[in-house]
Image (cartoon, helix red, strand yellow):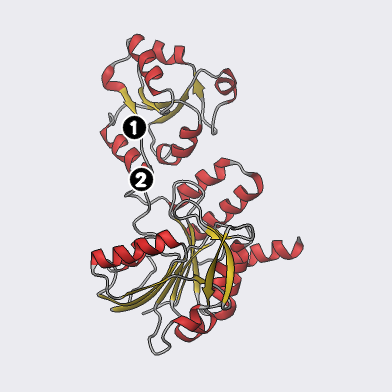
Amino acid sequence: MKRMLKDYQKVYRLLEDKESRDIYMNRLNWLISEDWKYVSNMVTASMKEAVTYGIGKIVKEMRDSMPKDRKFVLYGAGKLAEYVIPFWRCDERFAGFCCNTQDKQVNGYLEYSVMSPEQLLAQKELSVVVCTTTFREEILKILRDGGYPEDQIFAIPDFQDTADPEQYFDPSFMKFEDEEVFVDVGCLDLGTSLNLRKYCRHVKKVYAFEPESKAYQNCLARKEQTGFTEAEILPYGAWSERTTLHFSPEVPGSSKVAEEGDCTISAVPIDEVVDSKLRVTMIKMDVEGSELEALKGAKNTIQRDKPKLAICIYHKPEDMTEIPLYIKELVPEYKLYVRLHDHAAGETVLYAVIPRA
């Protein structure tokens, strides 16, 4: 236990900026407590001034459309409110919640006051954001039957949260070569490799690992559709040695190595696949908890080429210490950053970069 604590402290001190340390500390607190406020703090720590994707963008557009001189409440104090609160509490007009749960009216919710529907209808001075999809129509009826002004009523629409377009390519500290040689471990649909083309003059070569058979076929099809001739799609997992692994093919993006898996895959070390005559400039890994083993199989490549690394560290608690410390052991001059590319507790990425002039 003492060793584990020292490792967390060591990684925390290795992180280069406040955003990284805030995300890391709040993620650790969330793992210990399962208190959602720490997830909310992570989202707040990572929030950009202009939110460009998912529910954050939806909320930003709603806030911009609301009266500038009137405070507002969120009507609904449940899971959706918990999820979106980081995007509302940054607005000085936010005045708390409304719901019909007496316990929350007495004790508050997420450290904000909670008024009753009767209090809200008696005032009619606040803008109201209906913050539930399950009971949206019921609440809208309560407001309208109570004579609430229509121009003061807003509602969060049904939505499907989307990915951060800057995931793996955070431009604030990532510097790209004119020609990139990219290793994409867990390429899923080839999307990340295709996105790289936005950040450099030319993608010279991509080694794209995807062992799940349907995803592999999708990658081949997308390569053909996009004319992405620089991509070599590899039907393997990345591992510390050449081996056969049990594998659990689940929903797209969640397939993983698992002892109880009902099929097997071939796995190979990255060092055995890449051409040593081509300097690898970046490695990205999102492989559902197998990142450390994949890194061990790339040891020679990392030490030789010192590529930019973008490695997911949210699949297993131990990844938060083992992966950063292993990377620093391989290349001590790496600078480490952590970024959250999600509106919840997923998509937490460790970046390792060599500073460039």
- The quadrant of the picture occupied by the C terminus is bottom left
* Element class at badge 1: loop
Instruction: Give left or right: position of 308 versus 63.
Output: right
Identify the image quadrant of residue 66. Answer: top left
Amino acid type, residue under disc 2 in the picture: Gly
Outermost residue, front side: 263
Residue 83 x/y as whole percent: 47, 39
Above or below, comparing residue 149 to residue 3 in the picture: above
In this rendering, the answer to whether 71 lies above or below 36 is above
The residue carrying mark 2 is 54
The vertical placement of 210 against 156, above or below, is: below
State the image coordinates of residue 178 (x, y, percent, origin top left).
Answer: 28, 79
Quadrant of the snapshot with the N terminus: bottom right
Q: Amino acid at mark 1?
A: Pro
Residue located 51% across and 23% down the image: 114
Within the image, what quadrant is residue 14 found in? Answer: bottom right
The image position of residue 214, as x and y in percent, is: 41, 59
Q: Is residue 215 visible?
A: yes
Any part of residue 13 in sight: no
Taking the spot 50% from the left edge, 43% from the top edge, the residue there is 40
Give the CA distance from mark 2 to mark 1.
12 Å
Of residues 334 and 342, the one nearer the viewer is 342
Residue 189, label in figure: none
Q: Earlier in the sequence, mark 2 or mark 1?
A: 2
Total residue callouts: 2
Report helix, strand or loop for mark 2. Answer: helix
The residue located at (49%, 73%) in the rendering is: 335
Q: Nearer the viewer, residue 93 or 217?
A: 217
Quadrant location of residue 341?
bottom left
In the picture of the structure, the residue carrying the numbered disc 1 is: 157
Circle 2 Cα neighbour tier, 10 Å, few/some/many (<14 / 14–19 / ≥20)? some
